Amino acid sequence: MISERAILVPIKIGHRYGYWDAEGRAVIAPEFEEAFCFSDGLAAVRQGGKYGYINSHGNLVIACRFDEASPFDGGFASVCLDGRYGL
C-alpha cells in the first residue's frame, strides 16, 4: 500500500506513463497518455485525449473529461472544458 506521503514521479515507459516511488519501484502501471506530478494529493493524467485526476493509489477520482488541466494548488485546479475555463 502506498503512503499518502510517498513521493511518486511520472515515468514514461514506451508510449505510456505510470508512476514510480523514490526507491525506483513502479507503483502505478503505465496506462496514461500523459501524466503530471502530484500536488495536493492528486495528479493530472490524460486518457482518451482528455484530462482527469488520480490519487496516489492510481484511482481515477476526477473523470478524464477536460481539454486541459493544471496541478492542484490550495485545493483548486484550473481546467478547460469546451473552450471554457474554471476552477
Image (cartoon, rainbow, N blue to C red):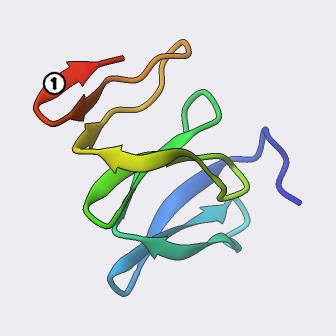
Q: Position of residue 40 (x, y in %)?
A: 60, 27
Q: Position of residue 69 (x, y in %)?
A: 31, 37
Secondary structure, mark 1, is strand
Give the class, few, some or many, for how many residues have Cα within 10 Å of label 1's Cα (few <14, many ≥20): few
| Quarter placement of the C terminus | top left
- What is the three-letter code of the residue carrying label 1? Arg
Q: Is residue 37 visible?
A: no
- The residue furthest top is 74
Residue drawn at the location 48% of the way across and 18% of the way down: 73
| Quarter placement of the N terminus | bottom right
Specify the quadrant of the image occupied by residue 33. bottom left
Specify the quadrant of the image occupied by residue 85. top left
Left or right of residue 58: residue 9: left
Along the line of sight, the residue nearer the viewer: 70 or 63? 63
- The residue furthest right is 1
Residue drawn at the location 22% of the way across and 35% of the way down: 81
Left or right of residue 4: residue 56: left
Along the line of sight, the residue nearer the viewer: 2 or 62? 62
- The residue furthest front is 82
Residue drawn at the location 47% of the way across and 26% of the way down: 72
Left or right of residue 80: residue 3: right
Q: Is residue 58 visible?
A: yes
Residue designated by label 1: 84
Along the line of sight, the residue nearer the viewer: 54 or 35? 54
Is the residue 76 above or below the residue 80 in the image?
above
| Number of marks in the rendered image | 1
Residue drawn at the location 15% of the way across and 36% of the way down: 82
Q: Position of residue 66 (x, y in %)?
A: 30, 42
